[in-house]
Every structure is written in C-alpha cells, then in structure tokens.
Amino acid sequence: MSDLLHRATEQFLACCVRAPRYRVAWLVGPAQRSSKSLLAQELCTRNNWAYLDYTLTPGYFDRLAPVVDRYQPHELVAEIRRWCAECAHPVLVLDELDALLATWDRAQRHVWAGQTARLQFLACGLVIVSHFFDQGTLMPLLPDRDPRYCLDLSGDLG
C-alpha cells in the first residue's frame, strides 16, 4: 500500500492543494475490496487532512432521514461548499457518501458529480470517495477532462 499511498498523496496534492481554481479530486473503485476507505484514512493521517465519514459521523446523513426522499443534488453541493469553508485542514476527504447517492437515480448522481467536479475556489481541497463512479464516467465532468483529478482503484485490487 505504501506505493499507492505515495502516488495518491502526490496526485491529490497536485489537484487539491496546488491547483488554484478546481480543487476537487475523486477516489473511486468497486464497492468491495478496493480499500478506498482505508487509503482515504491513511492519506488523512499521513498528511493532516480532515476525514469525514458522512454515514457514521453524527449530524450528517442521520439528519436527512426525514427528508432524504426530497434531498436534491444542488443541496448537497451547497453543503459541501459550507463544509470546505469550515474546514481547518488543507484537504477534506469525504467518504461514505454513497449511502446518500444510493437514494438518487443515475441522472441525479450525474448532475451532482458534474456540479461537484467543477466547484471553484474552495477554501480547502476536496477528495470524494465513491464506488458509484469510475474514471470513464467522471472524465467528461472533470476540469479539462484531466485524469489527474481521479484516482481509480479498479485495477489495484488486492
């Protein structure tokens, strides 16, 4: 994992810290056995980044229970902007978001991913961890279709 950790650190530093305008990167791979969450947590520990488990951290997914059927992509985009503005770390890693994304259809997920991928001038970098997307799906949505904004672990299964 150390080679992958080093590669991910360099890739996300370039996209999320050094990039002046678009600072959103994606860590994607299959739902099982891709070690996305483990890698995300290691990145945060190693680099002093913030880690947010959207499903298990109180005050996030749990507060949506009464309205989750009406929650829309633009609302999550606004929340992400706020979380980044409040983040005291250089990068916020947002993991376990798939519980919410699973309540949306493919078109809503696509709209959300397109809006999120092109968020500009965030107060901190952002790494989205998800199994709903892969590099091929995200490529048209990424700034300048730049593959550096997406680390796909599909080929790195152990």
Image: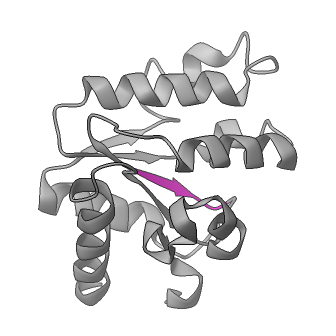
129 in magenta: yes
Colour scheme of the picture: one colour
Q: State which region is magenta.
A: 127-131
Which quadrant is the N terminus positioned in? bottom left
Q: Nearer the viewer, residue 149 or 51?
A: 149
Kindly tell me whether residue 148 is visible in this rendering. Answer: yes
Residue 13 rendering spot, x and y as whole percentages: 23, 64
Q: Is residue 41 left or right of residue 127?
A: left
Q: Residue at x 22, y 55 (%)?
A: 17
Q: Is residue 115 magenta?
A: no
Q: Residue at x 22, y 80 (%)?
A: 6
Looking at the picture, does residue 79 appear above or below residue 21? Answer: above
Residue visible at 72% across and 68% down? 137
**Foreground residue among 107 and 154:** 107
Picture coordinates of residue 36 (x, y %)? 46, 66
Q: Position of residue 116 (x, y in %)?
A: 56, 43
Locate residue 87 relative to residue 99 in the image: left or right: left
Observer-nearest of 75 and 47: 75
Kindly tell me whether residue 28 is visible in this rendering: no
Kindly report the secondary structure that dominates the magenta region of the rendered protein: strand
Observer-nearest of 7 and 33: 7
Picture quarter containing residue 62? Answer: top right
3 left or right of 145 in image: left
Decide: is 108 above or below 67.
below
Question: Horizontally, is 37 left or right of 50 in the view?
Answer: right
From this view, report whether residue 148 is shown above or below residue 23. below
